[in-house]
Amino acid sequence: MDSRKPPEFTLELSADRSNVKDVVKGLVHTVFFHRYFTPLTPATHDVLDTTLPYVSEDDIESLIETRATAFVRSLDTATSTTPHTSPSHYNSKSAAPSPSRGTLSIKFLERKRRKGWFIAKADEETVWETWLIDVTLTSARSEPEAARNRRVMERSLQEAAMRVVEVVDGEKGHIPPITTNESNPFPYQIVIHPRGGG
Amino acid sequence: MQQHARPAPRSASAASNPSTNPERTNNQRETLPQRTRSSVDLAAYTGAGGEPSRAAEGSGAGPQDKESTRLNQIIQHFHTKAALTICAARAQLPRVRNRDGNFKQDRWFNIVLDDTDALVDELQEWQRSDLSSDRPAPLVIEVYVDTANLNQNQALVIADESGKRWDVADALAGSAHSSPRPTNKQGGKFCEVVLERWTVEVGDSDEESATGRTEQLPNVYKKGVVLFRSLYTFLRFLPTWKLYRRLGRHPANGGSLRVKYRVKQGGLASGSQDSLLTPLYPLHHRHSPFEQPEDIYDSEPDTSHYGDDANGLLRHRFAPLLTPAGPLRISLLYRRHCDFAVASAEALLSSRFFGRRESDPTTTTTTMDRYNTTELGGRAASANAKGKSPFKAGTLASSPRPRLPTYDQGFSPPPSSLPEEQRIAVSPATFIKTMDAQKAEIRDIGRPDRRASQKRTSLNTLPQKALRAPPHSLPNETAIASSTSSPMAPPSLSRYQSSFAGRTKRTSSTSQQDKANTSGGSSARGSASDQAASGTRSDDEAIQDFVGLLESDKVKFAKLIKPAARHSIDLSKFSALREESRALADDMSASSLLNQGTTPPSRRLSNVPALSTSSSPRPLGHATHVRSRLSTQSIAEEAGRHGEESMDEEVEGEEPLLFRQDL
């Protein structure tokens, strides 16, 4: 067993409050689309004028939906706890709410059957790939700023989606062998790492 | 190798299918019409696992035979699946049914697409049974925009990054490869512009691909799965995709512009006229004074033809799929900008007689802004990054003058230098006529329709009038802008009033409708448009006033009275209006913060009425939201309907099972 750490790929997103959930979901679906090895009928979903692939499998769909919702909630919580609770820290110079940030990670695991001698087989699950999605929640105080944020958001989504394609295309050597075609061979996890605002 | 051995591999597999299934590789030609999905059971591959493929050839050893058969199938299906994936993303391919009455699907490489018979003839070369030993020619697919349906009065134009329009036929004619331009059936100028050239091939074995020799076929297949998923995704990032969808949305136009594909063998000389390599507008117009965003496509500029990026072409290469027979490659050469439209030839001509100097700066700005809301060459982000997004209402009030010089250069050299005398020659009446005619034609073409449909009902007449106004020097530009944007009117209108007013309302109403499925989208829009309409009435009146002013200018123009003063009055008047609207908009947006994740209208409209809205905060019916209208919709439907069937069919072993069935 080699001791190399499984690769980690980082994607960065910038989004405003009204689109952050869509943007995050779109990108997560894009990642899953390239890692769901079972025969799949592809679907697409437009987010911010970009057509992204979509995995229309119930369990994946609902997992992504619930995680995205929870993630956005965690971003909201982070934002709301910053300036108001600690006036002493509230620097009058930085009157703008600092952008809230959060990280979502997607992990793909492989199951290795372990034959126990006396105990029941316990499948060992090891991570073979991690995707980190760093999301910055933007807010705007004026229309031009909102417009700029929107452009940045659109561009960040396009770049992140393109990066997914680059990565999956260029890095294929680390995908573990697949031994079954019946169900998805690689279990997955979506983990929310909340961070404070700013 | 004896082909009779073919049925044997399958019987050796865990999931065996007793029925014979004509393999593509096996004397396919007479059974082509009956093509079923790939029948290879690759599970047997993994059973072999480390089974050595012997160097011994010709001895007909069982495993060796199997292996090479499978390798051959991989090569075949690599080509045919790639062709199907690409063409399905650029055209509506007819589906076929299999003997059970279900739609045939191609499941190779674990991506399920509706199969078609439209490519059967073209793909024969790549369905031979000896591909692994006798390398086939490269499979080339060209995607082009076809103007066969344009009539005499129409011309194909392309907009560059800053919104200037260029006559395509001129560019093609002026290129090194010109020949007398044939006309199409209706007497229109014939031109076809190749947008993409895909090449699918078995490449040369070299050092880099030497490792493929020892690659196990299941591994090859596994990597192929990822490759085809990323191909599917990438196809929908490209500029041509956006063009395809835009044109596909308004088939009722009579299809004056169509995206089409052709399949051919590579390696043959493409002839003297390669429209893909022809730049459609001069280099210096490609670099606008505004910020030029970097490319997001992970493609490299194509330097092989002109030595620099002058031709606006990009090349993209997917990582090769290494096999014992050599690396399987997919690569693409494509145009970065595909913002084509149809213009009235008359308008094009008259625009050449008029410099830009008389243009209404406001209108000029409008046109350019409108292009920036459009997806220029599919790079919406780039347009917005230029600081001319529709959200920047401020640009209208601020001095638009600086922009004029750039805009001035608009068409090819001749126009900008015409003396004033010629301008006098055209009467206002001609303008109006030209504009109206042009508008009538272009109205059908359909530009990206993001927010249009809901506003269309209420505001349709207005835009015609309002945008018809700026006539003078740029009848072509502005008229096209206005008329093509008649489906597109709202954005420019909203620019006059407020970027947010209508949109916000729409958002709030539509979010309530979001529970409905895609079909509910239209009802949502219906109600939204009512809201939008009422809210913007006062703005509409303001526009009508403005329009009235412009129209009177138009009449006076013929006498070469520079209406500069009047323009500034117009601007200040309407910028004052805009302030009010903006305040309103801010209130509206503040009050509508409930829209969690509801798509802003520009997204929602994503062009096709049945197209998924991009968000639904509720999990309900999410799956149905998502089906995109074009090639995937039918697929998704089929998936839904045939979910069970596909399972059955898997058991039959009729499709490529990637991996060993679990013990």
Image: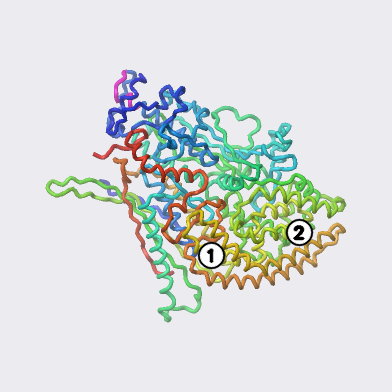
Image location of residue B27, percent across then percent down: 43, 22
Q: Amino acid at mark 2?
A: Ala
Q: CA gap, disc 2 to disc 1?
A: 32 Å
When asked about the image quadrant of residue B604, the answer is bottom right
User: On screen, A82 above or below B186?
Assistant: below
Question: Chain for mark 2?
Answer: B
Amino acid type, label 1: Ser
The N terminus of chain B - image quarter: top left
Q: Horizontally, is B515 left or right of B167 in the view?
A: left
Chain to which the residue tagged by mark 1 belongs:
B
What secondary structure do most residues of the magenta stretch adopt? helix
> Residue B239 placed where, x, y %?
57, 46
Q: Is residue B627 visible?
A: yes
Q: Quadrant of the C terminus of chain B?
A: top left
Quarter of the figure with residue B108: top left
Give coordinates of residue A78: x percent, y percent: 40, 70
> Crowding near pointer 1: few (<14 within 10 Å), some, many (20+)?
many
Question: Can residue B481 be found in the magenta stretch?
Answer: no
Relative image position of residue B595 (x, y in whole percent): 49, 66
The residue under the point 74% across, 61% down is: B361
Of pointers 2 and 1, the one earlier in the residue sequence:
2
Q: Circle 2 is placed at which residue position?
A: B469
Tell me: residue B102, above or below residue B448. Answer: above
Farthest residue to the left: give it.
Answer: A118
Are marks 2 and 1 in one subunit?
yes
What residue span does the magenta drawing correspond to? B59-67
Mark 2 vs 1: CB contact within 8 A: no
Q: Secondary structure at mark 2?
A: loop
Question: Viewed as shown, does residue B358 lie left or right of A35?
Answer: right
The residue singled out by tag 1 in the image is: B509
Is residue B63 in the magenta section? yes
B612 and B352: which is toward the camera: B612
